[in-house]
């Protein structure tokens, strides 16, 4: 069953009179509960592609449907609500909130976006913390955690709301070799456990091997 | 909402030095306002109290036109017995009025048989005067044999301290008072100095006192003629309301020429200190404006810095689905908390300052008055008012940064370096 359908999308960035074609007439579909990677050299359009699918940016041309909704027609408010509801995010630099503990970072989307009741919230957080193997580190602040641990917390934060889709832009770029493999395998295991679709970008060949489907982008086009 | 407050508080603590410095600046502004309004307010209250309770009274009623030429103390603008009766009836019917007292104001020549000088005199009915000006006695110094129950006896005169010093007069000394009556004829009477009165602000503050019966004899006036009627209210805070009420009732009394018969004024119209009081109010407002500026600039600055330093964080919040309104509220609460913490500290330090000033009493000279002792105090309403201003301005100053944060596009914010 298709979760993401992209129809002839193009993205042009304008800086004054200069136009840069970041994505050029791309069409593809991504099925539910798959582990998909976008690979390619720097500047090939991986991040732009993830931003489009993740409802963070709009294409200049074309249509994007995620979970049956045409997201390119959404306004700001609707896009935010849709992201909170359907999509989870994992960032290259972890992007944990430094003033919150690991537990509170994971709790953030449940409180600020989903408004889950306290009892249910606790249960969901402990469950996901256990899944990423960070239960014993839950009261630590991000600056007390290693890179790999931070990314595990970020994965837990992305998954705690039970999204249908998780977007991860170069999730292992700031991690050492061992941590990178650990995090990517963790993501894959969680895909199997929760049935979530994972879409990530990378240019690390060892990470690419973990993907079920790999799309290669070169100069804004699928090759 | 509690969670938003928690996050906002932690974000404030994240930049401890900056938060402390900003908070100190706001605290300084608050303390400045509290101390100034406590000092200036107590000075104003004390002076108004002194003027109304020991000299002018709270309101004065005269024959129409008297106040225009009050400096010359005209005797031809006296209230006759009929007019006084009307006033007496009007004031008796008003339950808000505590007391009223008749007075005769006159200029005279005072002689100690070797030197002569001018003196402004306030002729009073002592038992009534003490009701409208209960503190007048506290300005007076009497001889040892004086009956404390009686303010003034016929034949006695109380002279201003500066005059007593200038003419080397002492309590018990005989003097002669010579005055012109309204027809221009001169009369003189012997008096004994029964007391000395300390001067206060304003020309009326340098008046001597004598008994109203003596003044009538000296000026050859009718028995019930008076120049002014001093009025005291039960509640000074109702002054404006009662003044308006009495003014409208007095306007109904018309003389033969079809013009108003009487005029009534509050102490503010009669004392030069009212301008100083207005200046004090103006300076208090100026202080509040300075405080507002301090709060506005410091919070705006710190919140702007906070937004620009946390662009990626804002991008993350937005990316994971936080509604723009929630992001805005996070920054507004941060500004509000900064203002709230500063207001609490400011109030504590301000109150401590007022307590210290009260303990060590401030003594100073004002005009020709020496050793004025101030007892600064601050009303709880004043503290609440100042705190509310700070909180409101804190939120107001945070609006622009918070709005900026809420309007950030996640894709741009996440890519911010």
Image: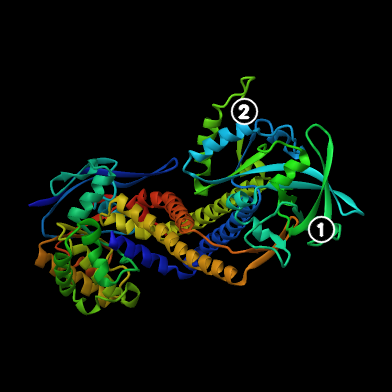
Pinpoint residue B238: horizontal percent, then vertical percent: 49, 45
Q: Which residue is mark 2?
A: B261
Q: Chain of mark 2?
A: B
Give the farthest residue toward the right. Answer: B114
The C terminus of chain B: image quadrant: bottom left
User: Is residue B348 shown left or right of residue B277?
Assistant: left
User: Which one is nearer the viewer's eye here, A73 or B168?
Assistant: B168
The N terminus of chain B: image quadrant: bottom left
User: Which one is nearer the viewer's eye here, A59 or B250?
Assistant: B250
Q: Chain of mark 1?
A: B
Image quarter of residue A90:
bottom left
Give the farthest residue toward the left. Answer: A1
Residue at the (37%, 67%) spot, across then down: B10
Q: Which residue is mark 1?
A: B164
**Residue A111 appearing in the image:** yes
Pinpoint residue A41: horizontal percent, then vertical percent: 31, 59
Q: Secondary structure at mark 2?
A: loop
Image quarter of residue A46:
bottom left
Give the farthest residue toward the bottom. Answer: A136
- Up the image or down, B301 lies above or below A123; here it is above
Q: Are marks 2 and 1 on the same chain?
A: yes
User: Which one is nearer the viewer's eye here, A203 or B137?
Assistant: B137
Within 10 Å of disc 1 (Cα), the crowding (few <14, some 14-19, many 20+) is some
Alpha-carbon span between mark 2 and mark 1: 39 Å
- Up the image or down, B131 lies above or below A109; here it is above
First in sequence: mark 2 vs mark 1: 1
**Residue B415 appearing in the image:** no
Residue at the (75%, 56%) spot, across then down: B368
Q: Secondary structure at mark 1?
A: helix
Image quarter of residue B101:
top right
């Amino acid at each position: 069953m298709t979760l993401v359908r992209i129809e002839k999308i193009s993205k042009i960035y304008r800086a004054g009179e200069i136009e840069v074609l970041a994505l050029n007439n791309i069409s593809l579909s991504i099925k539910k509960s798959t582990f998909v990677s976008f690979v390619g050299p720097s500047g090939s359009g991986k991040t732009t592609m993830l931003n489009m699918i993740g409802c963070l940016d709009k294409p200049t041309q074309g249509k994007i449907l995620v979970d049956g909704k045409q997201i390119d027609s959404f306004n700001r408010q609707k896009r935010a609500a849709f992201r909170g509801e359907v999509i989870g995010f994992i960032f290259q630099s972890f992007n944990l909130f430094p003033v919150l503990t690991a537990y509170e970072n994971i709790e953030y989307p449940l409180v600020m976006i989903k408004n889950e009741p306290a009892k249910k919230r606790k249960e969901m957080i402990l469950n996901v913390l256990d899944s990423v193997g960070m239960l014993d580190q839950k009261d630590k602040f991000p600056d007390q955690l290693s890179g790999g641990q931070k990314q595990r917390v970020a994965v837990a934060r992305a998954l705690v709301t039970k999204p249908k889709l998780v977007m991860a832009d170069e999730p292992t770029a700031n991690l050492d070799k061992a941590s990178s493999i650990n995090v990517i395998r963790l993501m894959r295991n969680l895909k199997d456990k929760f049935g979530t679709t994972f879409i990530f970008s990378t240019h690390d060949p060892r990470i690419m091997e973990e993907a079920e489907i790999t799309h290669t982008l070169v100069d804004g086009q699928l090759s | 909402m509690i969670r938003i407050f928690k996050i906002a508080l932690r974000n404030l603590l994240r930049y401890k030095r900056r938060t402390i410095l900003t908070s100190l600046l706001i605290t300084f502004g608050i303390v400045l306002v509290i101390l100034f309004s406590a000092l200036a307010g107590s000075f104003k209250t004390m002076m108004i109290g002194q003027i109304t309770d020991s000299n002018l009274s709270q309101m004065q009623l005269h024959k129409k036109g008297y106040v225009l030429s009050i400096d010359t103390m005209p005797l031809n603008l006296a209230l006759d017995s009929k007019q006084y009766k009307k006033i007496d009836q009007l004031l008796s019917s008003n339950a808000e009025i505590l007391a009223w007292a008749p007075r005769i104001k006159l200029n005279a020549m005072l002689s100690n048989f070797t030197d002569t000088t001018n003196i402004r005199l306030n002729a009073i009915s002592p038992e009534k005067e003490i009701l409208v000006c209960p503190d007048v006695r506290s300005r007076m110094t009497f001889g040892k044999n004086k009956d404390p129950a009686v303010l003034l006896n016929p034949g006695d005169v109380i002279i201003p301290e500066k005059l007593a010093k200038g003419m080397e007069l002492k309590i018990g000394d005989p003097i002669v008072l010579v005055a012109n009556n309204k027809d221009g004829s001169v009369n003189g009477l012997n008096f004994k100095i029964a007391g000395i009165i300390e001067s206060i602000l304003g020309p009326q503050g340098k008046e001597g006192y004598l008994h109203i019966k003596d003044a009538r004899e000296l000026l050859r006036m009718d028995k019930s003629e008076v120049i002014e009627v001093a009025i005291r209210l039960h509640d000074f805070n109702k002054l404006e309301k009662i003044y308006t009420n009495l003014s409208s009732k007095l306007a109904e009394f018309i003389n033969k020429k079809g013009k108003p018969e009487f005029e009534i004024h509050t102490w503010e119209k009669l004392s030069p200190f009212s301008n100083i009081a207005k200046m004090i109010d103006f300076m208090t407002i100026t202080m509040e404006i300075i405080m507002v500026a301090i709060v506005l600039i410091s919070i705006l600055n710190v919140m702007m810095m906070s937004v620009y330093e946390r662009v990626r964080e804002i991008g993350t919040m937005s990316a994971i689905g936080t509604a723009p309104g929630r992001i805005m509220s996070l920054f507004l609460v941060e500004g509000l908390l900064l203002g709230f913490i500063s207001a609490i500290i400011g109030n504590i330090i301000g109150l401590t300052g007022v307590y210290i000033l009260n303990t060590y009493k401030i003594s100073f000279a004002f005009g020709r008055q020496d050793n004025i002792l101030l007892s600064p105090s601050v009303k709880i309403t004043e503290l609440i008012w100042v705190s509310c201003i700070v909180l409101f301005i804190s939120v107001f100053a945070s609006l622009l940064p918070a709005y900026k944060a809420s309007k950030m596009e996640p894709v741009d914010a996440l890519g911010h370096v």
